[in-house]
Amino acid sequence: MERLRQRADFLAAAAGPRVNAPAFVLQRRGRDDSGPIRVGFTVTKKNGTAPERNRIKRRLRELVKRVDPLSMRAHSDYVLVGRRNALTRDFATMLDDLRAALHRLERQPAKTTTSKTT
């Protein structure tokens, strides 16, 4: 797995399907290339001071390391948006939340844009 680093990739993932969990939001974007699965992490300033945000990101990175890569769709980008609850939530529970979020994300239909004509 590789890391997402470009802002455009984060914005593209934000436009795709998402699943909410107590400690994070999981977003996914399918790609048309044959590259590896890429994962990005972000935490907004409203979630605390810089050390708290860094701790949230470290916990999210460790979650992704421990989840089975086969549960992620190939040729996709994933973004985990951390929430303040990630600081205090039990790690094993967060791991279960991530597995459930990945499963729910796979069952979601792809977003389609339709235009209304009046």
Image: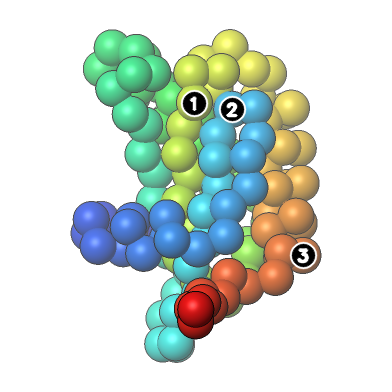
Give the answer, above or below, for where 116 lies relative to 100. below
Q: Secondary structure at mark 3?
A: helix
Q: Are marks 1 and 2 in contact (CB under 8 Å)?
A: yes
Which disc number belongs to residue 13?
none
Marks 1 and 2 sit apart, C-alpha to C-alpha, by 5 Å
Examine the rendered structure and indicate whether residue 103 appears above or below residue 112: above
Residue 97 visible in this rendered orientation of the protein? yes
Precedes in sequence: disc 3 or disc 2: 2
* Lower sequence index among marks 1 and 3: 1
Q: Please name the residue that numbered disc 3 is placed on.
A: 107
Callout 3 amino acid: Arg
Q: CA distance from mark 1 to mark 3?
A: 23 Å
Q: Residue at x 39, y 43 (%)?
A: 41
The residue singled out by tag 2 in the image is 23
The quarter of the displayed image where residue 85 is located: top right
The amino acid at mark 2 is: Ala
Comparing labels 3 and 2, the label whose residue is closer to the camera: 3
Residue 83 image label: 1
Mark 1: which amino acid?
Answer: Arg
Where residue 88 appears, as percent x and y from the top left, is 58, 12
How far across and down, in percent of the image, does residue 108 sit?
71, 64
How far across and down, in percent of the image, does residue 114 sit?
53, 78
